[in-house]
Image (cartoon, rainbow, N blue to C red):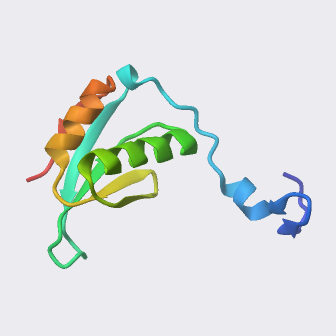
Amino acid sequence: MSNNKTVWSSEEGDLRKKQSASHTKSLPPQQQTIYLHRETSGRNGTPVSLVKNLVLSAEDMKALAKKLKQQCGTGGTIKDGVIEIQGEHRQKIAEILMKLGYKVKIAGG
């Protein structure tokens, strides 16, 4: 992008989002090893399942997060390239990802 300081235009909307949007290409599932972590720190003891080491485009990441949330019957979000699923669902997430062709490693206690 040029050195233009415009952050919003009526034709293109918010230009800051276009600058920071990652243009990551998705790797095929067979070429990825996914790590599943469990985290409770900073959450008042409530466990959260983290899906890390994904190399996916933003759209594919959203679609995978949605599928995992639906299959686990719970909420979740995407933060800094990591899918967070509420609750302890690592085993179920591992089964879903393996069916999709990913290599999965469950990490942590």
Q: Is residue 83 above or below residue 86?
A: above
Number of marks in the rendered image: 0
Q: Give how far across and how far down residue 70 sits, in percent.
A: 33, 48
- Quadrant for residue 36, please give it: top left
- Quadrant for residue 8, please give it: bottom right
Query: Could you say which is closer to the camera, residue 81 or residue 65?
Result: 65
87 to the left or right of 7: left
Q: Give how far across and how far down residue 79 sits, in percent.
A: 44, 59
Q: Residue furthest bottom?
A: 44
34 to the left or right of 57: left
Q: Residue at x 91, y 65 (%)?
A: 10
Query: Could you say which is closer to the camera, residue 27 or residue 69?
Result: 69
Q: Residue furthest left?
A: 109
Q: Residue furthest top?
A: 30
Q: Is residue 94 above or below residue 11?
A: above
Q: Give how far across and how far down residue 35 sits, in percent.
A: 26, 41
Q: Residue at x 26, y 34 (%)?
A: 96
Q: Residue at x 18, y 50 (%)?
A: 89
Q: Residue at x 23, y 42 (%)?
A: 93
Q: Give how far across and how far down residue 12 sits, in percent.
A: 86, 57
57 to the left or right of 72: right
Query: Could you say which is closer to the camera, residue 7 or residue 60?
Result: 60
- Quadrant for residue 2, please give it: bottom right
